[in-house]
Amino acid sequence: MKKFFIGALALGLLAACNTNEEQIQSQDETVNNAIASRGSCPSEEIRQQALQNNPELMKKYIDIENKTAKYQQDLSLGRVLADGTVEIPVVVNVIYRTSAENISDAQIASQIARLNADYGGTNSDINQIPSEFASVAAGDTKVRFRLDRVTRTSTSVRSWRTNDAMKKTSTKGKDAFQPANYFNIWVVGDMGGVLGYATFPESAGLWNDGVVIAAKYFGNTSYAPYNMGRTATHEVGHYLNLRHIWGDGACATDFVDDTPTQQDKNFGKPTYPQIDVCGGVSRSIMFMNYMDYVDDAAMFMFSAGQKTRMNAVTASTGARAGLRLY
Ligand SMILES: [Zn+2]
């Protein structure tokens, strides 16, 4: 689409330039006759001559028109909603060996619904956020997900590793569908002890870009305590540039100011409050954040700072701006 548009624009511009030369000549004659008229605004003619004489300016002009056209397309397609919410088109690639691994459309729908609830701040357990964290809760992150298509691929692979084999047709998986513009999720059978894993925004548009989730933990399932679809909520956080809340090190940073520094990951269903000491300072930690390791039923919030990081990535200037386009 982009190439087509640049080509069409260049053709239009050439045609415009040819006529403009003639117009500019005749305009000079008109000016000599010196009858001022509202019907004579030479801005565009002057611009076209400048563009012809200055390749750098021409480059900027084409870039601006392309970006404007894409913005218009975004709006007409609904990927950027009227309130600025970015609606991410999702491709679910089901890679199955057994019939149980060939998950139902209903299970897929339950996962999309979970993502929209958690990222929209409409999850029913949001009222469990402790009052001390209420002021820094993200609420609606302005990110939504729309199932665009489902692919189903039969495979002979019994157990997968985290080496991206499921992301290639040539290695008994399935190639990503246009990863620069669509969010690909691969749902596979067994991955050992791994529930899921994600690529970060530096991989935007690459062949392996997206999220992998084991079928047992995708959407609403019977595999408690990871049965509520929040493995995907967590992994999509990584896809949108969130780090683990403990910063993947002892008292390390997640580059978010409003998530209290914590010593390490948490598991299970901790009771509130949990107090960590980092750098000699005691803090009540936000273990109920989606980017910790607690059970699905024990996580129910993003912070405002995390929302800012995700919005930076999905912005028109962000690494994942391609998700706003087609
Ligand atoms: Zn993680």
Image (cartoon, rainbow, N blue to C red):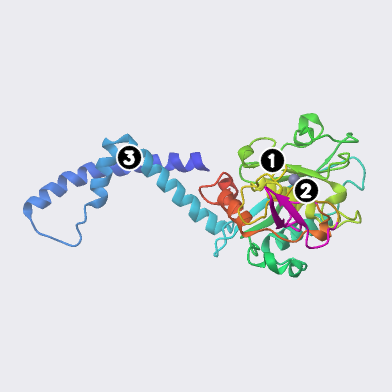
- Amino acid type, callout 1: Thr
Label 3 crowd bin: few (<14), some (14–19), many (20+), radius 10 Å:
some
Q: Earlier in the sequence, mark 1 or mark 3?
A: 3
> Magenta region: which residues?
269-293
- Amino acid type, callout 3: Leu
- In this view of the protein, which residue sits in the foreground, 310 or 245? 245
Mark whose residue sits in front, 1 or 3: 1
Mark whose residue sits in front, 3 or 2: 2
Q: Which residue is mark 2?
A: 265
x and y percentages locating residue 302 in the rendered image: 68, 58
Find residue 57 and name its label. 3
- Residue drawn at point x = 71 percent, y = 67 percent: 122
Residue 42 makes an appearance in the image: yes
Q: Is residue 285 magenta?
A: yes
- Amino acid type, callout 2: Lys
Mark 1–mark 3 distance (CA, rounded to whole Å):
37 Å
Q: From the viewer's perspective, is 214 left or right of 30?
A: right
- In this view of the protein, which residue sits in the foreground, 42 or 23? 42
- Residue drawn at point x = 70 percent, y = 69 percent: 131
Q: Do callouts 1 and 3 mark residues in contact (Cβ within 8 Å)?
A: no
Judged from the image, the secondary structure of the residue bearing numbered disc 1 is loop
Judged from the image, the secondary structure of the residue bearing numbered disc 3 is helix
Judged from the image, the secondary structure of the residue bearing numbered disc 2 is loop
Q: Which residue is mark 1?
A: 199
Q: Main secondary structure of the magenta part?
A: loop
User: In the picture, residue 15 is in which quadrant?
Assistant: top left
Q: From the viewer's perspective, is 58 left or right of 229?
A: left
- In this view of the protein, which residue sits in the foreground, 295 or 214? 295
